[in-house]
Amino acid sequence: MDENLNIPSETKTIEEKYKILSPQIKSLIEGESDLIANMANVASVLKWGFGHLWVGFYIVKEKQLVLGPYQGPVACTRISFGKGVCGKAWQEQSSVIVPDVNLFPGHIACSADSKSEIVIPGISGKNVIFVLDIDSTQINFFSGIDRKYLEMIVKLLIDYSDC
């Protein structure tokens, strides 16, 4: 695949962007089995394709989420099980959308610019092996559309990478 993103200027909606970027993501990762390399490319595509504040991965290591590949400002390095939005998604093995991070009990504020967040767990077998974390500078930015497409992208990562 050409390592350049192709997003036509007439693309108007979030769903249109996902429909355009999802096959490009698949093409980027389907020939590469290294999870870290694939995470790095996915983080870049999502950051630059949507203009999010922060896009990245936390990998389960030694009973903690440890910072993995990301795009954006400096981030928290380790997150405990059940703590913050990422820890909750890990604990519940379910995607979490937070419309306003200031109203989320126990939110871990890595950046004061973060206003809303979505976290998608990467599950292999019965275990969460990583989470995809995305922050926006806008309140109530993420929806079920984001959840749907991001869960598909995370599944691609699991399917094509050595997990």
Image (tube, rainbow, N blue to C red):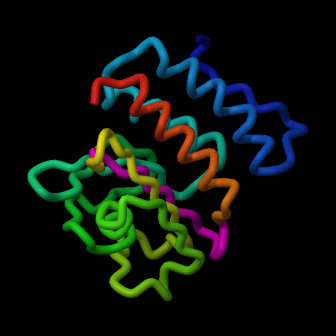
Question: Is 120 situated left or right of 83 in this image?
Answer: right
The residue at the far front in this view is 126
In depth, the one of 120 and 8 nearer the eye is: 120
Give the quadrant of residue 129.
Answer: top left
Q: Position of residue 24 (x, y in %)?
A: 63, 24
Residue 67 appears anywhere in the view: yes
At 57% from the left edge and 28% from the top edge, which residue is drawn?
25
At 57% from the left edge and 18% from the top edge, which residue is drawn?
27
Give the quadrant of residue 49.
Answer: top right
At 63% from the left edge and 45% from the top edge, which residue is drawn?
149
Residue 43 appears anywhere in the view: no
As for residue 134 lying within the magenta part, the answer is yes
Q: Position of residue 55 (x, y in %)?
A: 47, 50
As for residue 89 lying within the magenta part, the answer is no
At 55% from the left edge and 71% from the top edge, which residue is drawn?
116
How many numbered tags mark residues here?
0
In depth, the one of 74 and 140 nearer the eye is: 140
Q: Quadrant of the C terminus?
A: top left
Q: Position of residue 103 (x, y in %)?
A: 49, 88
Q: Quadrant of the N terminus?
A: top right
Q: Which residues are magenta?
A: 129-141
Q: Position of residue 16 (x, y in %)?
A: 80, 42
Instruction: Provide the major secondary structure of the magenta segment.
Output: strand
The residue at the far right in this view is 10
